[in-house]
Amino acid sequence: MKPPAPAHACAIVLVLLPLLAVLQTTCAQKNAIDIYSLTVDSRVSSRFAHTVITSRVVNRADSMQEATFQMELPKKAFITNFSMIIDGVMYPGNIKQKDAAQKQYSAAVARGESAGLVKATGRKMEQFQVSVSVAPSAKVTFELVYEELLKRRLGVYELLLKVQPRQLVKHLQMDIHIFEPQGISFLETESTFMTNELADALTISQNQTKAHIRFKPTLSQQQKSAEQQDTVVDGNLIIRYDVNRTLSGGSIQIENGYFVHYFAPEGLSMIPKNVIFVIDTSGSMMGKKIRQTREALIKILEDLRPEDHFNLISFSREATQWKPSLVPASTQNVEEAKKYANSIKAQGGTNINDAMLMAVQLLDTATREEQLPSGSVSLFLLLTDGDPTVGETNPTKIQKNVQEAIGGQYSLFCLGFGFDVSYAFLEKLALDNGGLARRIYEDSDSALQLQDFYQEVANPLLTAVTFEYPSNAVEEVTQDNFRLFFKGSEMVVAGKLRAQSPEVLSAIVSGQLPMENITFQMESQVAKQEEEFQKPKYIFHGFMERLWAYLTIHQLLERMVSASDADKQALETQALGLSLNYSFVTPLTSMVVTKPEGQEQSQVAEKPMENAGVSLYARVHDLPSKTVGTPGLNAPVLYRYTSRKLDPDLRIPSRKGFLANPLLASSSSGGPTILDDYLDETMEATTSAAPAPIQAPTVILPLPGQSTDQLCVDIKRTPGPLLLLLSDPDQGLEVTGEYKMEKAQFSWIEVTFKNPQLQVHVSPEHVVVTRGRRSSEYKWKETLFVVMPGLTMTMDKAGLLLLSSPDKVTIGLLSWDGLGEGLRLLLRDTDRFSSHVDGILGRFYQGVLWGPPDTTDDSKRTLRARGFDFDATRELKLDYQEGTPGTEISCWSVAL
């Protein structure tokens, strides 16, 4: 007989991100509601993702328990279906016009019931939540379906999978099928929870046109340890890929009477650009925001090409331009601009109107006086964190002023920093002027967010792009003309084939290069294309019609932002009709979720607009702060005396703590002297000082040709702060670092691979990984597991980052926080270095000769590398390679 169950209620939370599932039990009676099956099935057919998430739970308690199904999905995705099956009875979600659903929502709120609204929860996500009571031994099946068109950004498409079951799941399985008729050129997976053991549960199979990613861990693989029943599955799984492309009119794909045309030609040269950076320096930008803005701006300026022209305008109460006109992006001008950017400070109000009008006038003058390259593209990049407070403060009037001034000649891109800014104001300002808006989230990687957005618009390839199809072949075509096409992006046009359409669908895409027009022609065999999408079982059939509807709705909603009141109603009616017809939860519709009788009768899910998330965030003001630390007298210190003269860099221990600048007095000879009482005190400290603890060397090198011995290298002097540590052209590998002699540690280390194109920049604060033009930031000691063609990148909870490949030297990086703290470099598989390896560390892997032991001391030898002799001494050092606290090792130690 079972013991009686406690009377208290237990809540369970299931969170699902795109390809995501999270179930969290939130009561003392752990796992009273048990997830016995959790599956994700996502089918990506020609960039359109159809995702079904199914969770089966059972109440193993002897009392009624409440389960809360909480799901997060991409902001650009539309929920298409949600249902619950309780005791064999299905309770579906019904999608209605928002006004009709609002009555049920208001009634639920009036009764004090939760309304189940979808809410913005982060940068890319919004949250949907439904609660239901579960009887003892009863089973419930939740099923959620959503769809999205994957957007190409900086050269890749991305699917995000976040897995947080919070308990062991008997049947946990995720399947992602990708089918791309153009052929898959690149596929990468990244995880923040994968260990080497758990990685065995991840399988990836791929051929020319399809890929299958499966994650199916066993119970033992999910379990943290034999003693702990907690799950190790907790984090993100990201799938990135791209498709094959040529210098052509793109790819026209046809399925079930609909077509989609993807256009992103390769091989085009960049168009020169003229860009004016309009930067908010008002008081609200003070602190972290302005620091990150300066950091990002300096990096962005470095990316300008010599043929580009640019200027900077900073504004607070008034607007100030850096130069009287746009200037070429020469090395000298860029360096001057970086100094200017580094000097900007935050204070005063926010005068957006005057700043933008000044920027437009600068471009107008430069264009009129023919100062800019022929055929170049002109654009503005506006960054602000607040509403206008000085000068013209009416947002509508500012939008009108800017639109009239620009007159359709230039593009405006707006970045809203944080959540105090009116995003709706910036979005309309951008869309009115051929650009787009993006929110920059206040976080440690805000500077990277700014840089990445700039990279999206930094490389224009074509202007005035138009798509043409035979009028007797197609109808109801989505947007078919675009102002700009940028490198790494993709243009998508979809439509419906007419009943009597030709057997061959043709298309002409035209655009403008700097000095000429260009035309692309494309043909697609209708019957052949239809057949290609009918056979495979892994395709969600009928997807292209839904893709067309999805794209049309998004474009209608975007046009509503900048439409007149008269046009807005017609656009809304059209978007609403499509939303209801295709069962999409959009900003114009709501989904009413029914429940068993006796429970809250309905919950309403609504899709929020971007500004809906503002109330979820509180603004944090960055205030300057100072911290003072005084190490104890037992801290290691090195000091030396020459008579009574003092080395100015000396740090003296005293009863008051360390003195970075000890009391000095000028002697008659002009040199600094130590006061008598300090001399007595420090001499006393010298005689009683404990032996210096064993330190970790700057780097530990496995010795060439040996399996156990190691070379401990300390850097004592350098020709400069920037060092080439390793270079192997045959491996396509280079490792550089900046070494600070005064701190005796690296301020950063950078590893660059040629194939795959990858750069890893590490500092004591974080790890920044750049693939092509995309950058991602990671914190030390976050679990990371990335598998890409030709390279695997892993990081464990000790903070050891490894870059490995079956045929390459393994490079390790570590933020060491033990004695002699700082960045550390590790090397493994050093026998894979080629004969061309070089660098101050690489020279120890080519033609190393050891001299005989010293006749009087066999712990000393001479080592010759690349014609240089080094004194090597056998010493005890601290091995950092396995992480803090390290172990003592005996190694041959040399100083560079």
Image: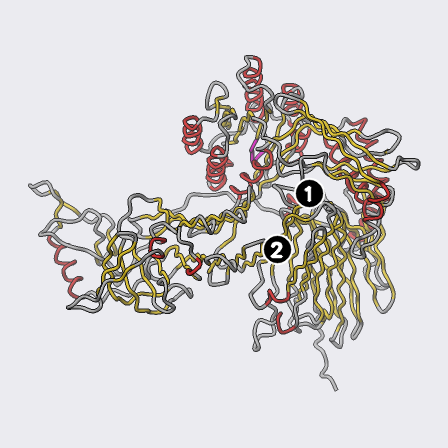
Range of the magenta residues?
382-386
Dominant SS in magenta: strand
| Quarter of the image that includes the N terminus | bottom right
Q: Up-down: is 552 above or below 734?
A: above
Q: Residue at x 61, y 55 (%)?
A: 189
Select label 1 or label 2 by which is in front.
Answer: 2
Mark with earlier residue (1, 2): 1
Residue 747 lies, in percent from the top left, at 38, 49
Distance from Cα at disc 1 to Cα at disc 2: 17 Å
> Of all residues shown, which one is farthest toward the left?
668
Count neighbours of disc 2 (C-alpha within 10 A) and say few if under 14, some if 14 to 19, many if 20 or more.
many
Q: Please, what is the three-letter code of the amino acid marked with disc 1? A: Lys
Front-lying residue, 128 or 704? 704
Left or right: 169 in relation to 369: right
Q: Are marks 1 and 2 in contact (CB under 8 Å)?
A: no
Residue 182: name its quadrant.
top right
Q: Secondary structure at mark 1?
A: loop
Image position, residue 824 (x, y; %): 39, 57
Q: Determine which residue is flagged by label 2.
A: 189
Task: Tell me which residue sits at (66%, 26%) in the image.
Answer: 463
- Residue 18: % across, % down: 69, 53
> Picture quarter containing residue 526?
top right
Circle 1 sits on which residue?
Answer: 151
Q: Is residue 211 visible?
A: yes
x%, y% of residue 111? Answer: 80, 55
